[in-house]
Amino acid sequence: EPEVTQTPSHQVTQMGQEVILRCVPISNHLYFYWYRQILGQKVEFLVSFYNNEISEKSEIFDDQFSVERPDGSNFTLKIRSTKLEDSAMYFCASNPGLAYNEQFFGPGTRLTVL
Amino acid sequence: ILNVEQSPQSLHVQEGDSTNFTCSFPSSNFYALHWYRWETAKSPEALFVMTLNGDEKKKGRISATLNTKEGYSYLYIKGSQPEDSATYLCALNTGRRALTFGSGTRLQVQP
């Protein structure tokens, strides 16, 4: 069964460093998403991406964040200069098209900023 | 700010017990409600997507109902098994693609 994969599973970085989180969505899906969950808080939406551009973003997704689909398979989230408060579990998701379709989630990347 | 609430926060039951949890949401701007099952260190797995008032969905021992007029959904597990232990998340679509999640109900089933 096709699944969303994410690498790495755990990333530790120093404050101020750039990190890139990688995702491989399900191959025939058209919409891609990033969410995050800070420990003890709700899962929060960051951004959705379609046809090589951002279709929606939340207030959290400021200029420190960017997303890219550099080739036909990968979908990346870049954080330019990490802060302590960026420590969270980051989830990638994808879905085939319709807005209310289920979103298929990856297992997450745990980002720890020291 | 859209607020999706889930209760209880956590639940401990014995194997064989039936249980249910609640997801509450604002009834205006409703588009779809999603239930996810999330085991530690695994991907959240979609259980149901419901869009119509009065919807009832079932998958094995798990079922869900939806009331969009009063803004709630129930998830039921009949005859809980240890493998049902997980966090159950509900999430709302309001016509945008972003899902707004509740805080989850953490279920622990004791053998």
Image: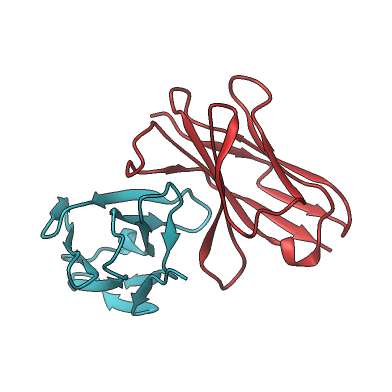
Chain colours: A red, B cyan
Vertical placement of A93 versus B11: above or below?
A: above
Vertical placement of B24 versus A30: above or below?
A: below
Which quadrant: the C terminus of chain A? bottom right
Vertical placement of A38 versus A101: above or below?
A: below
- Left-right relation of A108 to A62: left
Vertical placement of B5 versus B99: above or below?
A: below
Which quadrant: the N terminus of chain A? top left
When asked about the image quadrant of residue B88, the answer is: bottom left
Residue beneath the point at 16% across and 62% down: B65
Position of residue A55 measured from the top left corner of the image (x, y, whole percent): 53, 40
- Left-right relation of A102 to A28: left
Number of marks in the rendered image? 0
Residue beneath the point at 72% across and 62% down: A87
Position of residue A12 measured from the top left corner of the image (x, y, whole percent): 79, 54
Position of residue A106 measured from the top left corner of the image (x, y, whole percent): 52, 43
Task: Single out the residue that lies furthest toward the top.
Answer: A72
Which sits in the foreground, B7 or B14? B7
Residue beneath the point at 31% across and 60% down: B29
Residue beneath the point at 88% across and 51% down: A17
